[in-house]
């Protein structure tokens, strides 16, 4: 039995002069006389390979010459040190076999963003996407790791729902056997029910928003990591989030430096992110904005543009708290000391990225909840089960939602959120 190894395992001094078996795809290829140089890529890295006509025979040499980039193949060859090769080593191929030939691979250097998105199913093979997908994998892994190490149970809410969490304007309606249902905007309310059983819960699931906004940060389908904890107040939740973000960054720095560098991410910047993060009340943020040339009145919601301009002045995340009650959904708990503001928080990422987390303390008093729903014109019948939680042993609690694609977008230093997810869904795109 032949033992195949990965390209990554070949790129070291102790592999020099050893014969290895590899398999993967042709990333680049050129011929000079009786030599073919190609770069082999697999999931782990790339390595230059050299094939001599005299070694493999004229028949095989011709076959290799004919196929294009992205052909899949296996090779047997000897590892040599080669300074001029892209990853410092070279394989002298003794034998190979083409597994799946490829001709005229549609993607080459000068393709537009639009073309690359139409061909996302092929573009995911690119080195950049490969690096992004690995960073994303580590971010998901770290999210689960953090919650599990901190006493949260993983759970799931439904995707088909009958009510809005974040206001009705961004609901996707779906026909549901003669009735109407919606795709969920957030699993928050279901998590709130589950804390009465498990106390601390989290879920990582898609959320759907019929967002009309065409910005660098909006998807219509995105991955949402949400948590909810009984007995927590706003500051307790903020403390967990801060710890979680640092935990995720630590994992990335342990496992993904190579990928971050490949994307030209400033790794030093990430290394410098420490607790405590900045904290700022909304009122202060409005002042800060105006001092930095961003016109904002008290009571204005923060749009993408404001966030971009404000957060470029930060070198670590900022928790903005105490928003005016009018600009936040009904479930946020009014501050007992100043009921015109709510005990909530948004975490804004620095470097012009902006909101990555939204969370806060929930109203747990029945009368307050009913009053807030009435003020917002919501029909209590649609929320009977949410209201029930305040009737049968209610407890103070808090939670948050983290946009995972936004987090990847920021941590990987990408220019648009669509690069942070394998198959982005936006107003204009539902394929491939
Ligand atoms: O701020 P949002 O709307 O808050 C909620 O949904 C709460 N119910 C969460 C909770 O407390 N359980 O959304 C939370 C996060 C945002 O901070 C943002 O990172 C992300 O979800 N998000 C989006 N990400 C990509 N595309 C969109 N259209 C997004 N909308 C929100
Ligand atoms: Mg928000």
Image (cartoon, grey):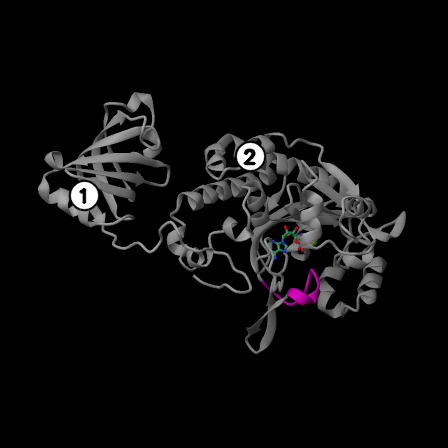
Secondary structure under tag 2 reads loop
Q: Residue at x 64, y 41 (%)?
A: 351
Spatial distance from mark 1 to mark 2, Cα to Cα?
Answer: 40 Å
Judge left or right: residue 244 versus residue 37. Answer: right
Q: Which residues are magenta?
A: 160-170
Q: Which one is in front, 262 or 208? A: 262
Q: Quadrant of the N terminus?
A: top left
User: For the residue carrying disc 1, how many other residues have a C-alpha within 10 Å: few (<14), some (14-19), or many (20+)?
Assistant: some
User: For the residue carrying disc 2, how many other residues have a C-alpha within 10 Å: few (<14), some (14-19), or many (20+)?
Assistant: few
Q: Position of residue 136 (x, y in %)?
A: 50, 44
Q: Which one is in front, 177 or 85? A: 85
Instruction: Find out if the beta carbon at label 1 lies less than 8 Å from the nearest ligand 1 atom.
Output: no
Q: Residue at x 13, y 37 (%)?
A: 53
Q: To which residue does mark 2 refer?
A: 266
**Residue 155 seen in render:** no
Q: Nearer the viewer, mark 1 or mark 2?
A: 2
Q: Position of residue 386 (x, y in %)?
A: 72, 60
Q: Residue at x 33, y 28 (%)?
A: 88
- Contact, CB < 8 Å: mark 1 with mark 2? no
Q: Which one is in front, 144 or 115? A: 115
Q: Quadrant of the C terminus?
A: bottom left
- For residue 161: magenta? yes
Judge left or right: residue 224 versus residue 38. Answer: right
Secondary structure under tag 1 reads strand
**Residue 83 seen in render:** yes
Where residue 97 is drawn, which disc sits there?
A: 1
Instruction: Find out if the beta carbon at label 2 lies less than 8 Å from the nearest ligand 1 atom.
Output: no
Nearer the N terminus, badge 1 or badge 2? 1
């Amino acid at each position: 039995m032949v033992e195949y190894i990965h390209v990554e395992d070949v790129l070291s001094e102790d592999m020099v002069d050893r014969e290895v078996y590899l398999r993967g795809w042709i990333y680049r290829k050129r011929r000079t006389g009786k030599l073919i140089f190609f770069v082999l890529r697999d999931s782990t890295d790339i390595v230059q390979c050299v094939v001599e006509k005299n070694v493999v025979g004229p028949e095989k040499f011709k076959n290799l010459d004919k196929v294009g980039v992205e052909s899949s193949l296996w090779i047997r060859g000897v590892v040599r040190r080669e300074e001029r090769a892209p990853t410092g080593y070279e394989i002298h191929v003794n034998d190979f076999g083409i597994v799946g030939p490829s001709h005229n691979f549609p993607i080459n250097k000068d393709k537009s963003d639009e073309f690359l998105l139409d061909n996302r199913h092929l573009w995911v093979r690119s080195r950049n996407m490969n690096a992004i997908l690995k960073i994303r994998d580590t971010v998901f892994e770290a999210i689960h790791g953090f919650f599990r190490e901190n006493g949260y149970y993983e759970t799931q809410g439904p995707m088909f729902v009958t009510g809005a969490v974040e206001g009705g304007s961004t609901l996707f309606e779906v026909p549901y056997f003669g009735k109407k249902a919606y795709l969920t905007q957030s699993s928050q309310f279901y998590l709130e029910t589950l804390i009465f059983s498990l106390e601390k819960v989290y879920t990582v699931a898609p959320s759907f928003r019929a967002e009309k906004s065409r910005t660098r940060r909006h998807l219509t389908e995105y991955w949402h990591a949400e948590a909810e904890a009984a007995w927590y107040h706003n500051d307790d939740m903020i403390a967990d989030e801060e710890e979680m973000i640092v935990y995720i960054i630590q994992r990335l720095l342990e496992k993904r430096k190579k990928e971050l560098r490949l994307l030209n991410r400033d790794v030093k910047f990430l290394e410098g992110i420490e607790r405590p993060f900045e904290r700022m009340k909304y009122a202060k943020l409005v002042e800060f904005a105006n001092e930095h040339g961003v016109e904002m009145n008290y009571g204005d919601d923060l749009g993408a543009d404001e966030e971009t301009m404000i957060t470029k002045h930060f070198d670590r995340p900022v928790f903005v708290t105490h928003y005016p009650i009018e600009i936040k959904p009904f479930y946020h708990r009014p501050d007992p000391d100043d009921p015109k503001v709510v005990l909530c928080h948004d975490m804004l990422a620095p470097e012009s990225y902006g909101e990555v987390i939204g969370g806060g303390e929930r109203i747990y008093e029945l009368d307050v909840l009913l009053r807030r729903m009435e003020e917002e014109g919501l029909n209590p019948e649609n929320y009977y089960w949410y209201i029930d939680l305040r009737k049968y042993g209610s407890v103070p609690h808090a939670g948050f939602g983290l946009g995972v694609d936004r987090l990847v977008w920021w941590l990987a230093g990408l220019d648009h959120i669509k690069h942070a997810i394998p198959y982005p869904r936006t107003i204009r795109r539902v394929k491939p």
